[in-house]
Every structure is written in structure tokens, then in C-alpha cells.
Image (cartoon, grey):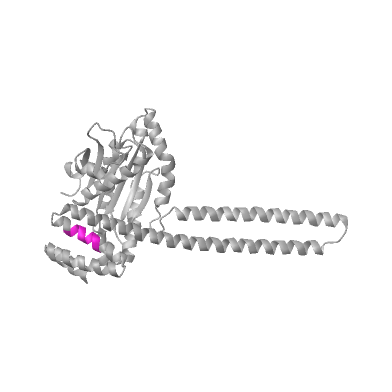
Amino acid sequence: MGLAQGRLAFRQGDWATAEARILGALAQAEQGEALEVQRQATLQLSEVQAAAGRHREALESFRRHKALSDRIFDEERTRRLDALDRRYEAERRELELETLRRERAEQGLQLSEERTTRHLLAAALVALALVFGGFLLRRRELQAINRRLADLTRTDQLTGLGNRRLLEDTLQADLPLSLRRRADGQRAADSDLVALLIDIDHFKTVNDQRGHAVGDRVLARFAAVLKATCRSSDVLVRWGGEEFLVVQRFVDRAQAPVLAARLAAAVRSERFAIDGEAPLALTCSIGFAAFPILPEATAGDWDATLALADEALYLAKARRDAWVGVVRRLDDDPAIEGQDVRSLLRAGAFELVRSFDREGGGAP
């Protein structure tokens, strides 16, 4: 009720009333540990504060919204992993039972053979073949199960994209290779990793007006648009909620605005028709940054790259249907370890490119 009243006041331009209603709903949700309501409330609070010109408070509210989204996503992933563990245990037990049944059948076969030397030898050979064949069959079945489990734990089940585990596995090899190529003097086109964080604009409205079932199908269709627009070598990850991450692998960071513009245009031109309902026209906001962020970077600076992309996404969401990218460090100080890259970005230490500074790019 409080969120609905807050939305109404927000549409009427009454920021103070909207914020009061939302804060009330947020307090009730925190008492009842209703995470989804908290997630919606913090996002709506961020929009109200941004509209009122209180951007610092809006940023903090948006960060709370992201933290809640990540927590909900992690809890959902834990439940699914538990279900996979139970399924794996059931299949393992079934394989053990099948092996016991085979062993009993082999024993019965051996006892039924004639007790002559020739038939004893034949029975032994048959038994050996059955045991060895059963071992190979069981091994292949276990390998297939392990492959399925590995795929499931690295895939977001709703969208079919990768999850954070897939990203971690990929980066274990990609980060050192990117740094090595830079150190060897290879051209930028072969060295950079570009992280693009993508957020669906006003997705909460889709859930509110069409329901979460339609919202889930929109997320799956949005993922298909991303997959159709990106290269097969790119890593596509559902980052949490309605937020996605694309990692362009071993490219020139100067090409990042081209991909960001292409992704935004693909989403803008798509009509999300779900179950015969009126098609939805959606847009997205994109923030990106490139690794390595400095010539002397280490693999540990990937987190700083993501932080810069996240801050750029926040700047893009202030416009909607826009992209903002971090290009390079402007000063000569190479040190970045231990520094707050978000503060550095706000202080103007990095060069930015923005769609709304270019002709025909993003929302006005």
C-alpha cells in the first residue's frame, strides 16, 4: 500500500510525500524481512531522490537496491544448488543399485553353468565382460551427470546466460592473458577486456503492471536480444535481477562505444510480445569500463574495473536509454590500489564518453 501511494505521489511530482510513503513501506518490509519489497522500495526511493536532485542519497539508495538484488539472487542460487545436490545423490544411489543388480545376475549366471573346465572358463569370461562393461557404463553415466551438474551450476536457469561462477572460471585465464599481452606489446585489439553493465529501464513497472511471470519472460527475451547482438566469444552473464553483464574478450577498448550503441539500439527496436499481450517497448542503460585500467594494473584491478562500470551505469540511468563509458585515467599517477575508484571518477580523474554527447545517441 505504501509503495503504491509513493508511486502515485511520485507521478504527481510530490517528492516529499513520495519519499515519506516509500520510507514507511521500507520500514515495514525490514521488520517483516520482506526482501523483495525492500528491493522495490529502495529502487523507487532512488528514483524519487534523483528526481528531487539529491543525487548522493539516490546513489546510496540504488546501492542498497543492488545489494538486496544480489542477496535475493544468491539465496535463489543456493536453493537451486541444494536441489541439484539432492538430484545428484538420488542418481548416484540408483547407479549403485543397478550395479548390485548386475552383480547378482552375474552370480546367478555363473552358478547355472556346467562345472566343467571349459564352461567354467566361458562363464568367467562372460562375467568379466559384464563387470567391465558395467564399469564403463557407470563411468560414462557419472561423467554425463557431472557435466550436467557443471553446466547447471554455471548457468542462469531463467535466461540461459552464464552466472557469476561462469564469469569467475573464465576470468581465471583471461585476466593474466590480457596483462601478458599488454606486457608483450601486442596491439590493443588483442588485449583489452571490456565490462558492460546493462540495466533494463523501468523494469519494475513491467512487474507491477504485467506481473512477475511476464517479467520473467521479458528477462528471457532480453537475454536472447543480447546473445543475438554480441559475439559468440563474449561472456554474457545475468548479474542480478534485471541487470546483465557483457564481457568483450580481447578487443580494443576504443570499440566499446560501438557495441554499447548497438546493444541499446537492439533493445530499443525490439518489441517484447509475451503471450499475445500488447507488445512492450523497452530501453536499457549501459555503463562500461575496460581492463586493464592502467598500464601497471594487476588481475586484482578487475574489481576496480567493475566499480567504474557500475558508476558509469549509474550516470547513464540518470538519463535512461543511454550509455556512459570510462575511457582512461587523466592524470599521470599510476597508483590505484587502495583508492576509491568511484571517488576518483566523480573527481574527474577519468575521461568519460557518453551517448548523449553524440549525435543520435541515447535519450535527450
The x and y percentages for residue 202 are: 23, 58
Residue visible at 41% across and 47% down? 168
The x and y percentages for residue 278 are: 26, 64
Most extreme residue toward the bottom is: 1
Query: Of helix, strand and loop, which mostly describes the magenta segment?
Result: helix
Q: Is residue 354 above or below residue 124?
A: above
| Res. 80 in view | yes
Magenta span includes 212: no
| Res. 262 in view | no
Which one is in front, 32 or 188? Answer: 32
Q: Quadrant of residue 145?
A: bottom right
Which one is in front, 59 or 314? Answer: 59
Q: Quadrant of residue 252?
A: top left
Q: Is residue 170 above or below residue 143?
A: above
The x and y percentages for residue 73 are: 36, 59
The x and y percentages for residue 242 are: 31, 56
Magenta span of residues = 41-48
